[in-house]
Image: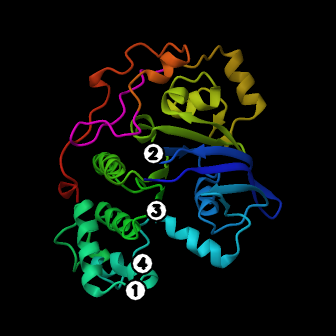
Amino acid sequence: MGVEITVEGLTKSFGRQVIWQDVSLTLPAGEISVMLGPSGTGKSVFLKTLVGLLKPERGSIMIQGRDLVTLREADLYEVRKLFGVLFQDGALFGSMSLYDNIAFPLREHTKKSESDVKKIVSEKMEMVGLTGSESKLPGEISGGMRKRAGLARALVLDPEIILFDEPDSGLDPVRTAYLNQLIIDLNDAIQATFLIVTHDVNTARTVPDNIGLLYHRHLAMFGPREMLLSSEEPVVRQFLNAQRQGPIGMAEEKDADELAQEEAEGHEMPPLPPIPLQLPTSAGNPRPTQREPGAWCRENGVTPPPGSFESHSTAAPRTTPELAS
C-alpha cells in the first residue's frame, strides 16, 4: 500500500526567481494524483523537490513521520527507496539492453542474486507488456516502449510512491491512451501512491483521483477530481477545459489590458463540459481508492454539468499493453 505525503508551506526559488511559494497539499496514500499547470510553472521542479533532489527554501515534506527537507543525506538516501520515478524520456542507458536497464536499481541498491534479479525484472517487464524485448537497446524501440521500460525500472524496488514526469510527452493520442490504462491497472495491482505531472487534459479528466494546478507561482487548487472539473475558478476552469478565455495567456498569464479587452468585448467563458467517468481497470472493476461517480458533487451540494458521468463520455482501449508499441 502507498504512503501519504503531506506538503506544508513549500517554497522554491532559483536565485531571485521564485518558482512557486507556500505550496500545501496532501497526496492521499494509494491514490492517483495529477499535477497540471502551464509550461514553466515548476511542475518538474516540484517532483524533484518531493524526492529530495532539490532543496526548498521553506516548508516541509512529511513522509512516515519524517521531514525530507531536514533529513541528513544518509537518512534521505533510505527514504528515497520508497520512490520510483519515471522520467520524461525514460532516462535509459543507451548502451545497455532493456533487461540491464531495468535490473540496474536492483544491482545498485540491493544484494540480490542474479537469479532473483532475473525473476523480478521478468515480472516487471511482464507487468508493462515488454516480455520478449529484454535484449533490445533503447535506440531500437519506439518512444512508447521506452516509456514502459522506464516504468518497469521504476517498479523493480517495489516503491510505495511513484512519480511520473510527463509520461505522455512525445506520445501520440493512442499510445497515451494505452499508457493511461497501464497506469490505472498498475495502481490497482500495487496500490502505491501515484503523482503524475502532465499537460494532457484528457489524462487529467479521466485518470486521477485528485488534481492540482500550479499557476503564477502558487498552487491554485488541489483536491478530488470532481471538485476541479466542476470548479468555477477561472484559471482552473480555463486550463482543465482547454479554453482561450480566462487569465492564462501565451506567456503563462494575460496582462490586465488583455483581460480588460476580453471583458469589454463581452467574451464569456463557455459552459463547463460534462465530467467524464473515471477510467476503470482493464477488467472493468473500480480500484480500492476510486470514488463512486458523482459522489463528491452530491456530498458537497454541487450540480455537475449536464451529461456528466454518462458511460459514453470516455472511451479507452481495453486491450493489453503489449499491443501498444
Q: Which residue is mark 2?
A: 32
Mark 4 residue type: Pro
Indicate the secondary structure of the residue bearing disc 2.
strand
Mark 1 residue type: Lys
Give the residue at x 37% y 40%. 288
Name the spot of residue 103 as percent of width and height, x first: 34, 79
Q: Main secondary structure of the magenta part?
A: loop
Give the residue at x 28% y 47%. 174
Query: Which labelled disc corresponds to residue 88?
Result: 3
Query: Which label's residue is closer to the chain start, 3 or 1?
Result: 3
Query: Which label's residue is closer to the chain start, 4 or 2?
Result: 2
Per the model, the C-alpha gap separating discs 3 and 2 is 18 Å
Indicate the secondary structure of the residue bearing disc 3.
loop
> Which scheme is used to colour this image of the protein?
rainbow
Q: Are marks 3 and 1 in contact (CB under 8 Å)?
A: no
Name the spot of residue 262 as percent of width and height, x first: 67, 22
Query: Which label's residue is closer to the chain start, 4 or 1?
Result: 4
Query: Which label's residue is closer to the chain start, 3 or 4?
Result: 3
Q: Is residue 287 magenta?
A: yes
Mark 4, other Cα within 10 Å: few <14 / some 14–19 / many ≥20: some
